[in-house]
Image (cartoon, rainbow, N blue to C red):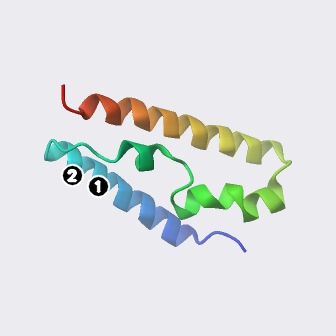
Amino acid sequence: MGINLDNAFKAHADWRTKLSAAATRHEQPDAETMSRGNCCEMGKWPLGAGATKSGGRPTFVAIIRSVNLASRQILLIILPCGPR
């Protein structure tokens, strides 16, 4: 099974909206969930069908590294927003 990119892109757009709304309202976003790369369709694909189909390809490995880096960067953005 492949990935439905329309659903994946919509989920990421929704995520950006939630993050922006939390910042506007000075709320603490759910850092644990938002920083995990496997909570959305796009993040789940590399762990399932993507790994089965393309796991050994250099571009696939680069995608996994990018997802992991993005997840760590999200934590750097979210965590400083918490109460001091």
Residue 26 place in picture, x, y as percent? 15, 41
Residue 42 place in picture, x, y as percent? 57, 59
- Name which residue lies at 37% across and 56% down: 15
Specify the quadrant that holds the C terminus: top left
Residue 71 place in picture, x, y as percent? 51, 40
Q: Of the residues shown, which amino acid type is indicated by label 1? A: Lys
Residue 27 place in picture, x, y as percent? 19, 44
Q: Is residue 64 left or right of residue 21?
A: right
Q: Is residue 30 above or below residue 14?
A: above
Residue at the disc numbered 2: 21
Q: Choose top left, top right, bottom left or bottom right for residue 81.
A: top left
Look at the numbered discs 2 and 1 and tell me whether their residues touch, using CB distance below 8 Å.
yes
Q: Residues within 10 Å of mark 1 (few under 14, many from 20)?
A: few
Q: Choose top left, top right, bottom left or bottom right for residue 76.
A: top left
Residue at the disc numbered 1: 18
Q: Is residue 26 above or below residue 77?
A: below
